[in-house]
Amino acid sequence: MRLFIAIVAGGLFGLGLHLSGMTDTNRVQGFLDIFGAWDPTLAFVMGGAIVPMAVAWRLTLGRKPLAGSMFPPRPSTEITRRLVIGSVLFGIGWGLVGLCPGPAMASLGYGGIPGVVFLVAMMVGMAAAPRVSQILDRRTASA
C-alpha cells in the first residue's frame, strides 16, 4: 500500500511539474530574470503549492497516516549557518541550470543527456554534502 501511494503521489507531482512548466528550464530562469523578460508563472506555482501544504500541515495534527507510523515533524524555523549555506548553493544551482531536484527527476524522460548529467551531478553533490558539512563544522569548532 505504501509503495502504491508513493508511486501515485510521485506521478501526480511529476505531472503537476510538467503541466505547470516547471520542467522547462527557460521558464524557471525567466522567473529569476527580474530585470529582463520576467516570467511570473513560478510565483503562481509556488503559491499553488504553499497554500495546500499549509492546509495539509493543519489537517495532520493528531492524525495517523494511511501508510506509515507517523507524519514527519514540522521543520525547524531556526535560521542557521548550515541553512543559509545550503540555500545559497541550492539557489546558485537552480539559477544556473533552471532545475531543482523535483523537476530534474520529472524531466528525465525527455531531458536528454543534459538532464541526466545534471541529475548525476546533483546526486554527487548530495552524497558529498554530509562530508563537506563535517569538514566545515570541524573548521568552525577549531576557529
Image: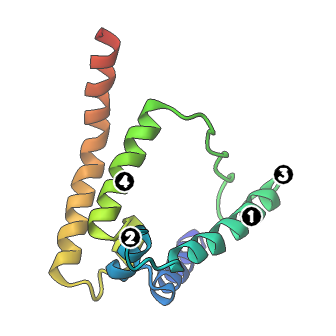
According to the picture, the residue beneath numbered tag 4 turns out to be: 90
Residue 5 visible to the viewer: no
**Mark sitting earlier along the chain (3/1):** 1
Residue at the image point whose x is 27% and y is 18% from the top: 139
**Mark sitting earlier along the chain (2/3):** 2
**Residue 136 in the figure: left or right of residue 56:** left
Instruction: State how far apart marks 2 and 3 are (Cα).
Output: 42 Å
Mark number, residue 56: 1
Residue 72 visible to the viewer: yes
According to the picture, the residue beneath numbered tag 2 turns out to be: 33
Is the N terminus in the top left, top right, bottom left or bottom right quadrant? bottom right
According to the picture, the residue beneath numbered tag 3 turns out to be: 62
Q: Secondary structure at mark 2?
A: loop
Instruction: State how far apart marks 2 and 1 are (Cα).
Output: 32 Å
Q: Position of residue 91 (x, y in %)?
A: 38, 55
Q: Position of residue 135 (x, y in %)?
A: 25, 26
Question: Which amino acid, mark 3?
Answer: Gly
**Residue 33 in the figure: left or right of residue 132:** right
Number of marks in the rendered image: 4
Residue at the image point whose x is 26% and y is 59% from the top: 122
Q: Label 3 crowding class (10 Å Cα cut-off): few <14, some 14-19, many 20+?
A: few
Mark number, residue 41: none
Question: Which amino acid, mark 2?
Answer: Asp
